[in-house]
Amino acid sequence: MYINGQWLTADEQIEVVNPAVNEVIATVPKGGAGEASKAVDAAYEAFTSWSKKTAGERAELLMAWYRLIDENKEEIGRIMTEEQGKPLQEAIGEVTYANSFISWYAEEGKRIYGETIPASDPKKRLFVSRQPVGVVAAITPWNFPAAMITRKVAPALASGCTAVVKPASATPLTALKLAELAHEAGIPNGVLNVVTGDSKSVAGAWMEDSRVRKVTFTGSTEIGKVLMKQAADTMKKVSLELGGHAPFIVTAHADIEKAAKGLIGSKFRNAGQTCVCANRVYVHESIEKEFIEAFKAEVKTLKVGNGMESGVNIGPLIDKDAVEKVQSQLEDAKSKGAVVEMGGETKGNYVTPAVLTNVTDEMDCMVDETFGPLAPITVYRTTEEVIKRANNTPFGLAAYVFSEHLSEAIEISEGLEYGIVGLNDGLPSVAQAPFGGFKESGLGREGGHHGMDEFLEVKYISLGL
Ligand SMILES: NC(=O)c1ccc[n+]([C@@H]2O[C@H](COP(=O)([O-])OP(=O)(O)OC[C@H]3O[C@@H](n4cnc5c(N)ncnc54)[C@H](O)[C@@H]3O)[C@@H](O)[C@H]2O)c1
Ligand SMILES: O=C[C@H](O)CS(=O)(=O)O
């Protein structure tokens, strides 16, 4: 654990397993409520001096961190592949994506503008400023061990906040490497703290601590709801980036090859373990056979294997529970009439990319987030029908529409109840744009200038002359 610039251990350890070979590769300290409180002590102490630095001074330190991460991206990528499983090139790509939040927010911190308001009383002057909220608690998932941390910590630190971070216990090594580089970059003690350990004990201590003024969580909707309730006791600001169940719509006017490639990129990134992966594929009946053949031809080019091997596109799932969930959805679909066109074989934590057809909305894979390399394809007839079916879920994070017909594309995009719409684009996520969901996919946004607002309080100053 990295607390107040010091590396701490604990009586108990957590084992870190490489999902490609199911072998323990490291252990990290199992911190609890005590370590969690020490981290808040440090962050609370550091907040006064850190928030008083100029945005430019904070930006210089953030960019020193950025440069060290960039210089070490191959090493960080190897750490990530070994603890999370994604192919090495994809892991290095995530490090670059994660770093883009640091560089983008280092600059955005310099643009936290206020305003003056014309007073109705000539003897008053009205001002509005935006100030850092204070100590931020960040709790992050295993599927993007670097980006889900920097997407929170970069705007937090750039705005003048300080942070305590709890990474997923499955993937703590990447987080600890980022902390090591932050220390090397000269980010002052206490500004960034990383506590590895028991989720409920660590996060529970933070949720009860009134000094923590903001909780930002990325993970399942189930846990997001728990944290939202806990935050109420001390009225913490809350940002929640939760589960998804993305529809992927291919209309009669789609560019079939573009759509097939777009589905490959969306569905099989991180072996299907992303919150914005296509989960439900809706194809217009007029192009069903043409699209399925084009998609299957692309799937056949994918190589499954250990992420450290060159040329591998799909690594292992994170653990056996993840494999069992995919298997369960596959068996359920087959029992309800789905046809397995290809894939779905399992070996250890590996699952070959599966394509299902003759799918109906009653199948589990069309109701619950899959988080694996399973592509269920169903057909639709009208635009009104597909919008209704796509929206028929508690989730509202990402959706995709492939159509070369402008008014059709706009009609569907506007009708979808989702925070992110990839229009002829299977990979929409970038640091400069707001990322977040409608409905039970979360609250708030990360990325873009919207992401900075999550760490700021608005203060109104009324000056009597
Ligand atoms: N919307 C997004 O940006 C986004 C990004 C990545 C993942 N996700 C979602 O996250 C889920 C997969 O990630 P996961 O399995 O790590 O999610 P998870 O909710 O199980 O865990 C997320 C984090 O919360 C911690 N946690 C678990 N129980 C907790 C508790 N009771 N109190 C406090 N913290 C607790 C975990 O240790 C981990 O650090 C999927 O549903 C995926 O859609 C969403
Ligand atoms: O899984 C969740 C991530 O937010 C996906 S992305 O890399 O931001 O698209």
Image (cartoon, rainbow, N blue to C red):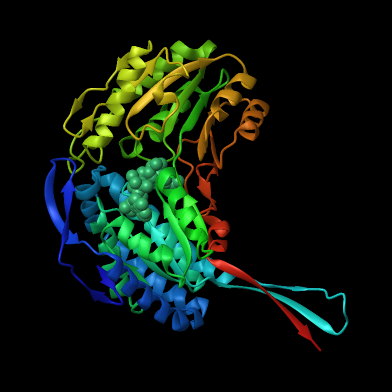
Q: Which of the pair 434/427 is nearer the observer?
A: 434
Task: Count the marks.
Answer: 0
- Name which residue lies at 82% across and 82% down: 124
219 on left or right of 84: right
Does the image show residue 15?
yes
177 on left or right of 442: left
Does the image show residue 76?
no
Quadrant occupied by the C terminus:
bottom right
Residue 222: % across, % down: 42, 44
Please determine whether, in this image, residue 314 is positioned above or below residue 15. above
- Name which residue lies at 21% across and 36% down: 320
**Which quadrant of the view contains residue 304?**
top left
Please determine whether, in this image, residue 312 is positioned above or below residue 390. below
- Name which residue lies at 72% across and 77% down: 127
Residue 188: % across, % down: 36, 79
Please determine whether, in this image, residue 232 is positioned above or below residue 442. below
Residue 292: % across, % down: 41, 16
Residue 202: % across, % down: 32, 62
Q: Which of the pair 99/192 is nearer the observer?
A: 192
Residue that sits furthest to the bottom in the current view: 465
Residue that sits furthest to the front in the current view: 233
**Which quadrant of the view contains residue 404?**
top right
- Name which residue lies at 47% across and 46% down: 429
Q: Which of the pair 285/247 is nearer the observer?
A: 247
Q: Which of the pair 332/186 is nearer the observer?
A: 332
Please determine whether, in this image, residue 38 is positioned above or below residue 76. below
Quadrant occupied by the N terminus:
bottom left
370 on left or right of 19: right
